[in-house]
Image (cartoon, rainbow, N blue to C red):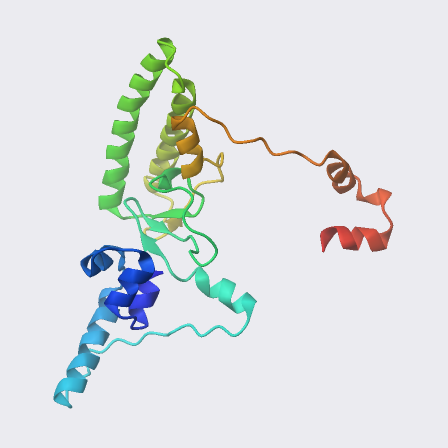
Amino acid sequence: MNTIANTNGMDSMLLAKWSGRADMKQNRVYDHTSVEDRNFGLIEMQKNEVGTVNTDSAFTFQIATPRTLQELNTKTTLSMHTTEFGLCTHSYIDEPCLKYRNCLNCTEHVCIKGDEEKKKRLHDRLRKEKILWAKDKEAVSKNVTGATVWLQTRELTIKRCEQMITLLDDPNIPDGTPLSLSPSEDVTHLDLAYQKASRKRIPVIENTQRKKIEDEPHLLSPALQMDLWI
């Protein structure tokens, strides 16, 4: 959202107040504007000040102007955010990030094949996770409250990290290919907070009657079948 606001010229003071920050300088941390866009802005600034400037090196970019809800939902995936290991494709128009600093267990996170620096970070993260796994296992043996849940979460992270590294090392996948893992157990930042407080979410109550209808739609008339899926 901050990148979109900067691209469209929002004032730094207004952006800081809108984001709830105490200092305008904090805006730069959340600004992922590309080098091309920065260069274009510099050229426009020089053009206004001097009047004439060499625009041979100017970059062009397109500003999304959606007119329908479908078009808006399509445009949201065009904005990506850099992460420690790759790119985040989450649409912040819909909702904030629910997996803060838990990118490896998120289905909206992608890694780019051929990015050696970020693959190196994945190896380093895997090494640290295995060290913490050993400590979690020791805590479980000592019957520490909540240690079992943290051990299960750690094992999931290690498994997905190893799977991603295997894909990044696959010689059959060309460089530049965006890679993502299959959906995993939905562990959000809220779930981790609950685990830390030794609390659990209220389980989802399943509507057995609706599930039966969905499994056996032939029990309904054609008109009701249409209503079921609308």
Residue plotted at (33% across, 19% down): 136
- How many marks the image carries: the answer is 0
Residue 99 vertical position relative to residue 152 in the rendered view, above or below:
below
**Left or right: 160 in relation to 213:** left
Residue 82 vertical position relative to residue 185 in the rendered view, above or below:
below
Q: Is residue 188 visible?
A: no
Question: Which residue extends farthest top?
Answer: 142
Residue 176 vertical position relative to residue 134 in the rendered view, above or below:
below
Residue plotted at (18% across, 80% down): 45
The part of the image, by quadrant, that contains residue 160 is top left
Residue nearer the viewer, 78 or 120: 78
The image shows residue 162 at horizontal and vertical percentages of 36, 32
The part of the image, by quadrant, that contains residue 39 is bottom left
Question: Which residue extends farthest left?
Answer: 50
Residue 96 vertical position relative to residue 164 in the rendered view, above or below:
below
The part of the image, by quadrant, that contains residue 208 is top right
The image shows residue 110 at horizontal and vertical percentages of 38, 48
Question: Which residue extends farthest bottom?
Answer: 51
Residue plotted at (23% across, 39% down): 120
Name the quadrant of the C terminus.
Answer: bottom right
The image shows residue 7 at horizontal and vertical percentages of 30, 69
The image shows residue 137 at horizontal and vertical percentages of 35, 15
Name the quadrant of the N terminus.
Answer: bottom left
**Left or right: 39 in relation to 186:** left
Residue nearer the viewer, 170 or 37: 37
Q: Is residue 126 visible?
A: yes
**Left or right: 128 in relation to 87:** left
